[in-house]
Image (spheres, rainbow, N blue to C red):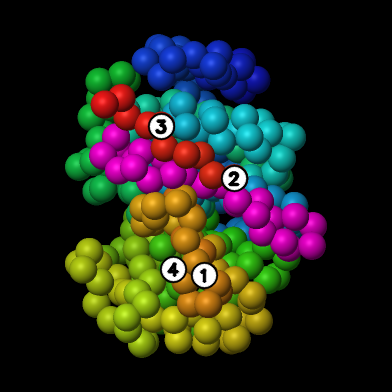
Amino acid sequence: MNVDEIISTMLEAKGQRPSTKVKLPGEPELKQMLNMVGDIFLQQSALLELEAPLKIVGDVHGQYWDLLRLFEHGGFPPESNYLFLGDYVDRGKNSLEVIILLLAYKVKYPENFFMLRGNHECAAITRIYGFYDECKRRYNIKVWKFFCDVFNKLPFCAIVDEKIFCVHGGPSPEMNSLEQVRRLARPTDVPDTGMICDFLWADPDKDIAGWAENDRGVSFIFGPDVVQKFLEKFDFDLIVRAHQVVEDGYEFFAKRQLITLFSAPNYCGEFDNAGAMMTIDETLMCSFKVLKPVQKKK
C-alpha cells in the first residue's frame, strides 16, 4: 500500500471539472489503508489536544471539488495543519473521494492532520443518506463495513491550546470533566443518548435557556447560558462546531462564544449557502476563508 500514490492519484482531479472520474484505490490497498488509519485513531486520544496554527473545516458531505478548493486556499497538507469536524460522507456525490483523501492524509501526516467524528460517520446514518449506496455501486458492501469500522474509531472532540473546544454538534449535559471524555471507549457505535450522542448531534438555540429537546429527535438544543457556563467551567474561550448549514459558511452565537462552521457551499445543490474554513493563528486569532456559492445559471 503506497499512501503517496493514493494521494497523488486522488489529487489528479485538481482543476478538473467536477464530473471528472477520479481513480480510486483498489480494494486490497484500500483495506490496508483503512486498517492503518483505524490503528492511528485508536493510538490517539478520543479528546485531541492540538496546537495552533491550525485550519478548521466543517461539514464537507461528499463535495470533493469544494474540498479541493478549500485545500487550494489553505494549503495542501503538510503545508498547513488541519482539523476536520466530521460529516465527510453522505448527501454529496463524491463521498468516497472525500473520505479516501482525508484518511490517506491522516496516514501520511498523523501528527498534523486531524479528523473528528460527525453524526454521519456511523452505519445507521450512512445506510440511509447515500454513502452505503455509493460504496455498493463503486466497490461493494464489504468496503462500506470497513469504513464503518474506521468511523467507530474516530475521536469526538479536540481542544486547541487549552482554550478552544471543537466538536461536531455541541457539548453534553453529561460532561463533567475532560478526563471523562478521554476515557470514552472506542471502537464504539453512536449510542441513542448520552455524551457521545450529544457531541455529534446537539444544536445551539438562541431562544432558549438551558437544555431542551431537539427537533431532530435526538440529543438536545442548548441556550447561550449553557455556552457561557461550559466555557467558564473548563476555562475555554470558544466553542467551534459544525452540524448545521449556515448561510455565510460561519455564524456566531452567544456573543461570539460559539461558532458554527459549515464547509460545503451550495449544499446538496439545494442551498445558496457559502462554505467557510477557519484559521487559528499562533495568537489564537481566528479568521475565515469563505467559498462563495457558485451562482446558478438562470
Q: Is there CB contact under 8 Å for labels 3 and 2?
A: no
Highlighted range, magenta: 263-288
- Local packing at callout 3 (Cα closer than 10 Å; few below 14, some 14-19, many 20+) is few
| Residue 267 falls inside the magenta stretch | yes
The residue singled out by tag 1 in the image is 258
Q: Which amino acid does label 3 sit on?
A: Val
Q: Residue furthest right?
A: 282
Q: Quick one: label 1 or label 2, which is nearer the N terminus?
A: 1
Residue annotated with mark 4? 170
Residue 27: x and y in percent read: 42, 18
Instruction: Find disc 3 in the rendering and name its residue.
Output: 294
Q: Quadrant of residue 272?
A: top left
Q: Residue 289 carries which label?
A: 2
Q: Residue at x 29, y 35 (%)?
A: 269
Residue 104 location in percent, x, y?
A: 57, 30
Q: Is residue 225 visible?
A: yes
Residue neighbourhood size for the residue with mark 4, other residues' Cα within 10 Å, grouped as few (<14), some (14–19), many (≥20): many
Mark sitting earlier along the chain (4/2): 4
Q: In which quarter of the image is the N terminus?
A: top right
Q: Find the distance from the CA under tag 1 to the CA under tag 2.
A: 17 Å
